[in-house]
Amino acid sequence: MTIATTEIDLSQYPFINKGLEGIVAFSTTKSSVDGQIGELIYGGYNINTLAEKSTFEEVCFLLWEDRLPTQTELDELKIALQTNRELPSQVLDYIRNTNKNAEPMSVLRTAVSMLADFDENLDFKSHVENYRRSIELTAKIPTIIAAFDRVRNGKEIVAPLNSGSTAFNFLYMLNGVQPGEKAEKVLDLCLILHAEHGMNASTFTARAVCSTEADIYSAITGALGSLKGPLHGGANTAVMNLLLDLKKQYSPDPVQFVKDKLARKEKISGFGHRIYKTFDPRASHLQKLSKALAEETGHIELYNWSIAMMETMKSEKNIDPNVDFFSATVYYSMGIMPDLYTAIFALSRISGWAGHFMEQMENNRLIRPKSLFTLEKNMVWTPIADRA
Ligand code: COA
């Protein structure tokens, strides 16, 4: 029985902000998202500039230090990332022995949580320790994802290289062969575009866990759980599954496909955003990549269907694609299994989560909003035998 909220003294609660929409809970130096003009800034730099000129490792430095690195600093960070890629043998054993049909995001979440067991200084909460942990997590997450994909496909795990970029090494561990320069560059750009994005659900989760003074492994484990959902990072896998469903149809019609879904009041993954009321600037970059790769790899049909879906969503609902829409076909053209896409999102977003964790630690206050109780209070206790 739910009591109507009108029976409650609402004067105490002027409004309930479902979804915390529009609430400013923190100040941050990490990123700014302006949904009206479609502008995304990391640490002061426009995403378009970073996409053109930067690398994922440089973006990590920017998100953790709030400035661009010197060449020496960037070289040091790259070496630190390269030399921390190996996993503890117990984590590898878990990856080898878990259910081969498990979801990659579930395996990633569990393996990240396990890493806490091998941190000898878990009680040390200094910035220096958390910076070290941020490097370790960023270095090890690609190894976890690639190792599980190899194991579930009956292949030997490929040990990480202690050289090369995050993108290069990940593709190498995933496929067992060194990627070409173009594949490395494409993935590096995807990692830049996914690194950070304001107070999204997984970042908020990481900060909420951090605010209790729990360790960074707990915060990132929570963030991974949040990212996994189809309304957040899980959307990229869902987009690819939609396109593959369409491909299975006898006579695929992407326009009708979208119209039918809308008529059934279903949400279409890869479209819409809480903040963007215009084109997501990340989607523009990914659309260009998607087209170029689709042409090159013989998937132009999927790209054309994506465009037809995009145009139909615009004309029917005035809703634009988000970051997940075109990233799906980019990864598909690179030969990556659809259920890995959200994990690849996490492989990049760890940089933003870690930046927010360290920022929260430096100026912490327990995150503790209120809720409005909607049942009658102090009800009369009925013995169990007398209950209907
Ligand atoms: N497909 C169809 N309709 C959508 C839609 C979508 N993907 N996204 C939003 N809408 C519609 C809603 O049905 C609603 O329409 P109505 O007012 O006629 O009822 C309106 O747009 C507002 O949607 P709402 O869900 O309240 O907005 P929100 O700010 O809570 O939602 C998302 C943001 C991301 C949760 C939502 O757009 C969504 O579910 N998208 C699909 C999942 C996705 O791609 N997530 C990744 C985000 S980066």
Image (cartoon, rainbow, N blue to C red):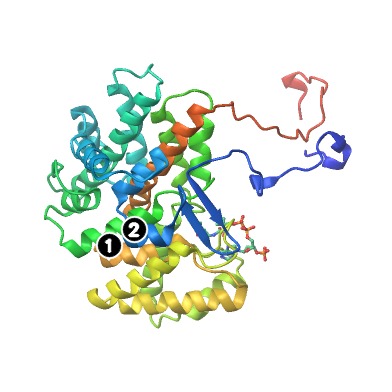
Residue drawn at 37 percent across, 46 percent down? 346
Q: Is residue 141 left or right of residue 265?
A: left
**How far from the left and from the top, in percent, is residue 305?**
41, 77
Residue in front for this viewpoint, 379 or 364: 364
**On the image, numbered disc 2 is attached to which residue?**
190
Q: Residue at x 44, y 48 (%)?
A: 196
CA separation, marks 1 and 2? Answer: 6 Å
Residue 330's quadrant in the figure?
bottom left
Q: Is residue 223 above or below residue 212?
A: below
Give, as a three-letter code, the residue at label 1.
Val
Question: Which of the 4 quarters of the picture holds residue 102?
Answer: top left
As drawn, 117 above or below 195? above
In the displayed structure, does residue 352 sit left or right of residue 79? right
Considering the numbered disc 2 on the image, is that residue within a helix, a strand or a loop? helix
Question: Which one is in front, 84 or 240?
Answer: 84
Counting from the top left corner in percent of width and height, residue 105 is at 36, 45
Q: Nearer the viewer, residue 253 or 50?
A: 50
Residue at image mark 1: 186
Circle 1/circle 2 CB separation < 8 Å: yes
Task: State whether label 1 is within 8 Å of ligand 1.
Answer: no
Q: Residue at x 50, y 67 (%)?
A: 321
Answer left or right for 42 relative to 179. right
* Res 294 seen here: yes
Please tell me whether mark 1 sits on a helix, a strand or a loop: helix
Q: Toward which corner of the image does residue 120 lie, by quadrant?
A: top left
Q: Considering only vertical position in the picture, is 114 above or below 252?
A: above
Q: Amino acid at mark 2?
A: Cys
Residue 247: horizontal and vertical position, in percent? 36, 74
Mark 1, other Cα within 10 Å: few <14 / some 14–19 / many ≥20: some
- Residue 8 visible? The answer is no
